[in-house]
Image (cartoon, coloured by chain):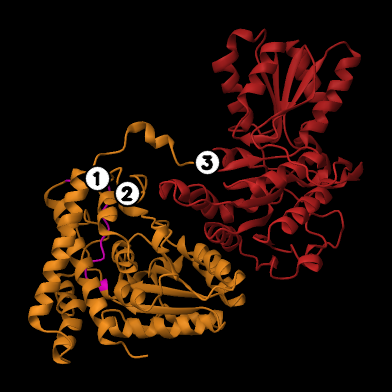
Chain colours: A red, B orange
């Protein structure tokens, strides 16, 4: 099987979908000609292959980029637009939150908005808080949006292809650090359903629920814990909205213990939603209080030691597990 | 092409319908208290919607804003379905989900009324992009007000539309007030249309109470867009007779100013011109007025007799 970074897997999904459907186009800042000419990046080579009608470099105008997607989707095209970094979502948010998410409802179901907004996220490259700020909980709070955060290159390919074919607006958040961590990716047609979580490692003693880059932390910690006789079940949500409560509850009912792990800061983070679902529907199964392992409530700092302090690590997760097992 | 007799008749009919529609809504919400929510009317501004839409073909698209009723009626939306939606009934064009503020009528290519001020232009860019992408021979008109002109999203949209030569006509209805703020208080430049120069697109100031002038200006902008020459910004100088909404006390609007603009009524003007040109008789105008009144009364009757949605229907139509 081919081994690709997540950026390459995204690239392959985009390419295959553009070949399959002439209504698919991509637009954003530097999606055609980029300041980084790297084959590891998601839109590399697409301009040369598909031309400037379907691969549109835009001005630095996030509201216009997102509005472009909304209007074109209403007309029946399949826009895949890029908001370069997750924190710039604020500039595009009116179009996504007030329009992409609501216009179908406001039309009484007459219109649909088959669009994808891709955003790069994640700390770890020293750019600081205006480039690194994971805002998935904001987006997941908006009815009418689907929110996908892949953790592996294969998942990114399968989920993005599904997102492009979905008749609804999908916010697709890619952690940049995963662009450079190759993994196996199926060739050709490969679809992963949106709204289904994936048990990445089975276990009996504790459930760790996570998504995106933190999956690596969870799997690493699970290895260490296994050596000490603690079997952690690692559940990768893949999709935050719609949330696969069935898989979450089944795992917690099996293990009786839960730690939720995410990189985003703590207060109002999506771990709170996962915890609430479990408390409401599986409280009787819990043998111990649940735990959250998250970034601290600070902006992501730039200095490497400070940034490392920000990003949750295996040690923190192991400590949280040991508190409740 | 100069406005034909048929076009002028169409515009007069459209303006009469819009006026009756809005006057009936004033009565329904301020006197009879029959409609919930906000009520934002275009009374006195009918020449813009009528003139713009008379210059469009059915396949042309409009993206409109909170003051949308005359735009949608002129584009051909069914008055009964609009009225039922304004009454928030299940039979409304959006099943009661949108109410008066977000009327969406995709069946006449009016897919989006956005009340986020400045929300329309980026979407119009997307709609026009789709027209260009598919090589369709049609345009997108985006209605904004003078208040929206100061939103950042409008700047982004106008720039992108120009860079990509998109077939958009940006229509700015300058009705002197943005909420309670007079034009001079929110904008220093004499004309919004002057900003077009910053986007290298044509900008034009037009008398917004002159339906024929409105028609001609959109006709030209549309032809330019279809020829691949990109967007146009047209500013229509007009006036908001009513408040921002029907609950507006209008303490900031001088009474003599309102009276002056009412004397410059766009309907009286077109009617007088058409009478003078012998295009219509006084009797025919009276018949047209009666017809408009009958259409509105029928729409109100339909809306009043229609049921509200069942509460559980609130959960429908979120996802496709």
Position of the N terminus of chain A, as image quadrant, is: top right
Q: Residue B219 falls in which quadrant of the image?
A: bottom left
Q: Which residue is denoted by mark 1 in the rendering?
A: B36
Instruction: Give yes or no for residue B36 being in the magenta stretch.
Output: yes
Disc 2: host chain: B
Q: Is residue B52 visible?
A: yes
The residue singled out by tag 3 in the image is: A142
Depth check: A133 or B265 in front?
Answer: B265
Q: CA distance from mark 3 to mark 2?
A: 20 Å
Disc 1 + disc 2, Cβ < 8 Å: yes
B237 displayed left or right of A227: left
Q: Report x, y in % for residue A20.
A: 72, 55
Query: Which residues are drawn in magenta?
Result: B34-46
Q: Quadrant of the C terminus of chain A?
A: top right
Q: Nearer the viewer, residue A232 or B219?
A: B219
Q: Secondary structure at mark 2?
A: helix
Q: Which mark is residue B278?
A: none
Disc 3 secondary structure class: loop
Residue at the spot x=11%, y=68% of the render? B290
Left or right: A78 in relation to A39? left
Q: Residue B147: give x, y in percent of width and height.
A: 38, 66
């Amino acid at each position: 099987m081919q081994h690709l970074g997540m950026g390459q897997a995204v690239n392959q999904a985009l390419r295959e979908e553009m070949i399959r459907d002439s209504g698919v186009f991509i637009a954003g800042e530097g999606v055609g000609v980029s300041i980084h000419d790297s084959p590891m990046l998601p839109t590399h080579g697409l301009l040369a292959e598909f031309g400037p009608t379907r691969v549109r470099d835009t001005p630095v105008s996030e509201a216009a980029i997102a509005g472009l997607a909304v209007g074109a989707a209403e007309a029946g095209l399949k826009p895949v637009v890029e908001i370069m970094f997750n924190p710039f979502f604020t500039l595009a948010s009116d179009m996504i939150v007030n329009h992409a998410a609501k216009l179908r409802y406001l039309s009484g179901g007459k219109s649909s908005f088959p669009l994808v907004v891709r955003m790069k996220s994640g700390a770890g490259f020293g750019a600081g808080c205006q480039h690194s700020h994971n805002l998935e909980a904001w987006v997941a709070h908006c009815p009418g949006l689907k929110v996908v955060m892949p953790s592996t290159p294969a998942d990114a390919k399968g989920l993005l292809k599904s997102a492009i074919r979905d008749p609804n607006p999908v916010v697709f958040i890619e952690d940049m650090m995963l662009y450079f961590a190759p993994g196996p990716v199926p060739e050709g047609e490969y679809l992963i359903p949106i709204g289904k979580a994936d048990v990445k490692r089975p276990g009996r003693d504790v459930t760790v629920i996570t998504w995106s880059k933190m999956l690596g932390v969870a799997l690493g910690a699970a290895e260490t814990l296994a050596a000490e006789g603690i079997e952690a079940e690692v559940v990768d949500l893949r999709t935050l909205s719609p949330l696969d409560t069935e898989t979450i509850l089944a795992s917690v009912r099996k293990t009786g213990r839960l730690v939720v792990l995410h990189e985003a800061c703590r207060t109002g983070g999506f771990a709170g939603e996962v915890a609430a679902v479990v408390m409401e529907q599986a409280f009787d199964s819990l043998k111990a209080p649940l735990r959250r392992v998250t970034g601290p409530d600070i902006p992501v700092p730039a200095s490497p030691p400070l940034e490392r302090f920000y990003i949750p690590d295996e040690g923190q997760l192991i400590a949280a597990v040991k508190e409740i097992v | 092409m100069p406005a034909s007799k048929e076009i002028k008749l169409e515009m007069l009919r459209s303006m009469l319908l819009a006026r009756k529609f809005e006057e009936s809504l004033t009565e329904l919400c301020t006197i009879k208290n029959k409609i919930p929510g906000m009520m934002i009317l275009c009374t006195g501004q009918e020449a813009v919607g009528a003139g713009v839409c008379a210059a469009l073909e059915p396949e042309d698209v409009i993206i409109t804003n909170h003051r949308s009723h005359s735009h949608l009626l002129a584009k051909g939306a069914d008055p009964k379905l609009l009225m039922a939606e304004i009454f928030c009934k299940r039979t409304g064009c959006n099943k009661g989900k949108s109410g008066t503020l977000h009327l969406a009528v995709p069946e006449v290519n009016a897919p989006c009324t956005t009340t986020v001020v400045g929300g329309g232009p980026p979407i119009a860019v997307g709609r026009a992009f789709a027209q260009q992408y598919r090589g369709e021979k049609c345009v997108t008109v985006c209605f904004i007000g003078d208040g929206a002109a100061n939103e950042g999203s409008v700047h982004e949209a106008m720039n992108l539309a120009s860079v990509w030569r998109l077939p958009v006509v940006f229509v700015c209805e300058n009705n002197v007030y943005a909420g309670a703020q007079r034009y001079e208080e929110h904008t220093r430049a004499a004309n919004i249309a002057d900003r077009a120069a910053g986007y290298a697109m044509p900008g034009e100031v037009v008398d917004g109470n002159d339906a024929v002038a409105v028609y001609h200006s959109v006709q030209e902008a549309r032809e330019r867009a279809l020829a691949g020459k990109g967007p146009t910004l047209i500013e229509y100088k007009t006036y908001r007779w009513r408040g921002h909404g029907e609950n507006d006390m209008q303490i900031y609007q001088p009474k003599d100013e309102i009276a002056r603009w009412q004397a410059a009524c766009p309907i009286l003007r077109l009617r007088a011109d058409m009478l003078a040109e012998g295009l219509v008789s006084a009797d025919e105008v009276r018949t047209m007025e009666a017809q408009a009144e009958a259409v509105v009364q029928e729409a109100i009757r339909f809306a009043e007799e229609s049921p509200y949605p069942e509460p559980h229907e609130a959960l429908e139509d979120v996802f496709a």
